[in-house]
Image (cartoon, helix red, strand yellow):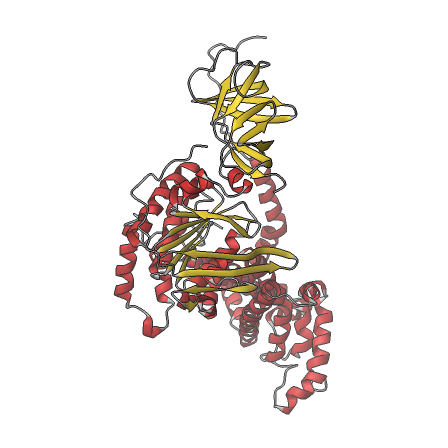
């Protein structure tokens, strides 16, 4: 064996996790193929219309109405899911009752069901001659073929996100926190609002953003229940399909670009909000 | 394990007034008994340690006092009033948890002030009063200037001090500590131990401290209650318990112990091939216990019972001898300088324990 003489050992940055370059490279390539390249195509496509053309498409009354409906109904659905999902997660984690496991399994059904099936089922229920639709009609409420129908469908498809985001965090929450608050004299409302909710807030925000994002992109379930009247109950994804069927690819891409930008801005804002509310150094 | 005497000051002067009376408390979970017909009285301004192995029911008792669980049967009174019927707010039992249970999203100051802020409006101190009280407590726990930090920015020892300040903020009638130093390393533990005793002496609040560490209990408490399987084995001042343990369990739990079976007759303990004078024991078969460091080592023709040395382990200031007598292993700690001549592995020596504690056999 030879002994290395005075050649200074080559300095190598040592990392604890092996394969840093490999995994980073893989991540970048994968993300590019799956997300970035299709998105780039979407971003580039509409400009063959020219800036004014794109602006004209995006600000046309029908597109504006569709975008308003898509984002507005998604926001309402996400808000409903925030409240209901939180309650359901709470019940699943905190209460013991027969059938709890069954209920837990049912939560994921909106994920598993083809959304078109969900749309047809919801339409059958809420149509003016359906069982719930008949009952609602007595109060003069029209659910199917109205913006309300869009909200119902979007609430349905977004529901699991909030439950599944909040549930594990709630399960792992240190029981000592609530016990400490109890011994300090906090009543059950104070324990919930001042101790539990702040602890699960990041998870709740994550779940709500996911539900919102899912609702914005939803297509299958909505088109059956919405009625799809331009300017009234036509969602933006449907409008894109309509444009595609008219062979107006650039116009479809322009609407898509508008959706993409709005979604991006909203998710960015939510992210910023989350960072703002996070306590410094609060490791999870 | 060396048991030290109380390292600071005199024991808190106790008056005979016992405000906290725990009477015939039982707690059952399904088939199991966490507590069985337990009676205990705790004095005003007293520092009481509940000492026992895990599963002995000490934490269950503490949680009953805090109102986190209800006993299956029994009564607890405080100053003559039924404690069990009081709400947590009326009980004023400040509790400190092993894992701190600080509110992560609140600053240190907000954590400490929490118990004041959740009071109903008519009892709630003003914002300035809460701030003043918080500052006082921060200085009591030696964390001045840490009020604006978050718990995640503190060390374990600092967090537990914040938790203690938070519990003290509600001006508790009793302070309940559930293995408060269990998650800390040995050095911080010892520092906090003395510091906790000082805080107790300054505030004078009746303190009940749960631990499984006998050294901690002996060091800190005015009195120690030793629990085993949901029952109290013995209550008393640390030195009294150590000097005269009431049961084999207590003797064993309070430190390393050697056990041998013997026979008492005519004021003598017959142990193996030796006899030892033993005045105050009833005749009959006994279990005799002796401490590893209270043994005289003699040559094979000297006093004591014969044993073979099977191991010699130097352990700092003391030397540990492992001796076999029949199939019984005994440990001897020799801390009196050089080992006597002829003591080595394989040698036959005679062991003469200087002090025995005996209990009737079969107990």
Count all numbered tags in the image, as a single digit: 0
* Residue at 49% in and 9% down: A5
Q: Compare residues B273 and B319 and report the one nearer the observer.
A: B273
Q: Is residue A37 left or right of residue B195?
A: right
Residue A60 position in % (x across, y down): 53, 74
The answer to whether residue A83 is above or below residue B207 is below
Residue B201 horizontal side relative to residue B211, left or right = left
Question: Where residue B332 sits in the image (x, y, percent)?
Answer: 52, 24
Q: Residue at x 58, y 50 (%)?
A: B229
Left/right placement of residue A160 relative to residue B220 reads right
Residue A253 vs residue B269, the one in the foreground: B269
Whole-percent x and y of residue B227? Answer: 52, 49
The residue under the point 50% across, 67% down is A55
Q: Which of these two is toward me, A164 or A233?
A: A164
Quarter-wise, where is residue A25 in the image?
A: top right
For the residue pair B251 and B216, the one nearer the viewer reads as B251
x and y percentages locating residue A109 in the rendered image = 70, 65
Task: Find residue A246 and report its image quarter.
Answer: bottom right
Q: Residue furthest front?
A: B266
Tell me if residue B103 can be seen.
Answer: no
Q: Quadrant of the N terminus of chain A?
A: top right
Residue at the top extreme, as displayed:
A2
- In the image, residue A281 sits, relative to residue B66, either above or below, namely above
Question: Is residue B270 visible from the viewing direction of this image?
Answer: yes
Q: What is the quadrant of residue A96 in the picture? A: bottom right
């Amino acid at each position: 064996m030879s002994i290395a003489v005075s050649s200074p050992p080559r300095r190598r940055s040592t990392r604890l996790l092996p394969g840093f370059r490999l995994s980073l490279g893989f991540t970048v390539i994968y993300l590019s193929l799956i997300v970035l390249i299709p998105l780039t195509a979407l971003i580039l496509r509409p400009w063959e219309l020219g800036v004014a053309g794109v602006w004209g498409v995006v600000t046309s009354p029908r597109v504006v109405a569709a975008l308003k409906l898509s984002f507005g109904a998604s926001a309402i659905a996400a808000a409903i899911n925030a409240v209901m999902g939180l309650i359901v997660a709470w019940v699943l984690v905190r209460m013991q009752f027969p059938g709890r496991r069954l209920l837990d399994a049912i939560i994921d059904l909106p994920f598993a069901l083809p959304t078109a099936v969900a749309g047809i089922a919801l339409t059958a229920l809420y149509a003016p001659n359906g069982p719930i639709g008949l009952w609602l009609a007595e109060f003069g409420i029209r659910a199917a073929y109205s913006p309300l129908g869009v909200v119902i469908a979007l609430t349905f498809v977004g529901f699991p996100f909030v439950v599944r985001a909040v549930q594990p965090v709630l399960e792992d929450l240190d029981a000592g926190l609530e016990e400490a608050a109890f011994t300090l004299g906090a009543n059950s409302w104070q324990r919930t609002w001042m101790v539990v909710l702040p602890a699960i807030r990041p998870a709740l925000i994550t779940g709500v953003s996911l539900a919102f994002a899912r609702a914005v992109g939803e297509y299958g379930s909505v088109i059956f229940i919405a009625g799809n009247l331009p300017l009234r109950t036509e969602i933006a994804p449907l409008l894109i399909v309509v444009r595609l069927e008219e062979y107006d690819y650039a116009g479809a891409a322009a609407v898509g670009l508008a959706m993409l930008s709005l979604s991006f801005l909203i998710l960015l804002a939510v992210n910023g909000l989350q960072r703002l509310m996070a306590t410094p150094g609060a490791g999870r | 394990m060396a048991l030290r005497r109380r390292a600071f000051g005199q024991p808190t002067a106790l008056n005979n007034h016992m405000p906290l009376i725990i009477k015939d408390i039982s707690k059952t979970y399904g088939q199991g008994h966490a507590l069985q017909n337990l009676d205990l009285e705790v004095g005003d301004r007293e520092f009481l340690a509940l000492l026992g192995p895990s599963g002995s029911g000490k934490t269950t008792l503490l949680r009953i006092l805090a109102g986190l669980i209800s006993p299956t049967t029994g009564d607890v009174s405080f100053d003559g009033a039924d404690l069990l019927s009081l709400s947590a707010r009326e009980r004023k039992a400040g509790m400190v948890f092993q894992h701190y249970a600080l509110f992560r999203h609140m600053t240190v100051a907000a954590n400490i002030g929490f118990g004041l802020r959740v009071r109903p409006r008519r009892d709630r101190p003003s914002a300035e009063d809460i701030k003043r009280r918080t500052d006082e407590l921060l200085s009591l726990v030696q964390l001045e200037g840490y009020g604006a930090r978050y718990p995640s920015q503190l060390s374990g020892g600092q967090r537990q001090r914040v938790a203690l300040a938070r519990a003290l903020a509600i001006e508790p009638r009793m302070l309940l500590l559930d293995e408060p130093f269990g998650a800390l390393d040995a050095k911080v533990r010892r520092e906090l131990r003395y510091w906790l005793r000082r805080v107790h002496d300054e505030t004078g609040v009746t303190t009940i401290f749960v631990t499984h560490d006998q050294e901690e209990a002996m060091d800190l408490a005015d009195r120690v209650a030793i629990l085993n399987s949901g029952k109290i084995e013995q209550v008393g001042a640390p030195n009294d318990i150590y000097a005269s343990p009431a049961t084999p369990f207590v003797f064993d739990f309070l430190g390393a112990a050697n056990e041998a079976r013997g026979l008492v007759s005519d004021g003598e303990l017959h142990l193996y091939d030796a006899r030892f004078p033993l005045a105050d024991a009833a005749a009959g078969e006994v279990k005799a216990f002796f401490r590893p460091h209270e043994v005289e080592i003699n040559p094979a023709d000297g006093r004591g019972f014969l044993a073979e040395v099977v191991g010699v382990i130097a352990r700092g200031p003391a030397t540990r001898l492992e001796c076999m007598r029949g199939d019984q292993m005994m440990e001897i700690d020799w801390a009196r300088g050089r080992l006597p001549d002829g003591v080595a592995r394989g040698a036959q020596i005679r062991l003469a324990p200087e002090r025995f504690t005996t209990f009737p056999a079969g107990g």
